[in-house]
Amino acid sequence: MSAQGRFAETSEEVEVRKEDQDRINEFGVIHQKLADLAAERKAIEEVLMNIEDAEQEVMLAEDNDSFLVQLGSTYVRVGEDEFNEFIEKKRSELDEKMSNIRSEVDTLDKEKADLKATLYARFGSTINLED
């Protein structure tokens, strides 16, 4: 956006109204939220992969009497049943988080598409809202 708050079109200038600027700002906020959610989703996917690796290690372990589980910065020794319970609870929590992220992404994608359509209708090719 230029310093005068206007977008130049081929034959005319379109003044940027306050509501236009609000929409542009909202688009930016939504875009950043989507990027943050993508990073959060990636982190959760990595934890889920680590959980799968841990489950495989437990299955291959010859001594199934006890396992170390990390809780924060502390390791706690637990039996196989407690370990499996811990893993299932953690997986359930992460699955719920992923579901919430998917839902929020769907909502934000729709809002972003609506804003994009409105802004392109107003400013045409003089505004670039591509990712």
Image (cartoon, grey):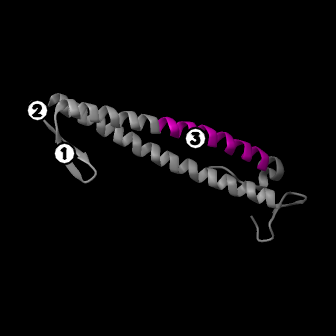
Q: Is residue 79 left or right of residue 43?
A: left
| Residue 58 sits above or below residue 2 on the image | above
- Give the quadrant of residue 66: top left
Numbered circle sitting on residue 105:
3
Q: Looking at the picture, which amino acid does disc 1 mark?
A: Val
Q: Give the range drawn in magenta.
A: 98-119
Label 1 packing within 10 angstroms: few (<14), some (14-19), many (20+) = few
Helix, strand or loop at label 3? It is helix
Q: What residue would you read off at disc 1?
A: 76
Q: Which residue is drawn at 79% across and 56% down?
A: 20
Q: Which residue is drawn at 40% across and 38% down?
A: 94
| Residue 70 sits above or below residue 15 on the image | above
- Circles 2 and 3: CB distance less than 8 Å? no
Residue 91 coordinates in the image, percent (x, y)? 36, 34
Q: Looking at the picture, which amino acid does disc 2 mark?
A: Asp
Of the pair 94 and 6, the residue shown nearer to us: 94
**What type of secondary structure mainly makes up the magenta span?**
helix
Which sits earlier in the primary sequence, circle 2 or circle 1? 2
- Circles 2 and 1: CB distance less than 8 Å? no
Residue 83 coordinates in the image, percent (x, y)? 22, 34
Label 2 packing within 10 angstroms: few (<14), some (14-19), many (20+) = few
Q: What residue would you read off at disc 2?
A: 65
Which sits earlier in the primary sequence, circle 2 or circle 3? 2
Q: Which residue is drawn at 53% across and 37% down?
A: 102
Cα separation, mark 2 vs mark 3, equals 42 Å
Helix, strand or loop at label 2? It is loop
Helix, strand or loop at label 1? It is strand
Tally the numbered discs: 3
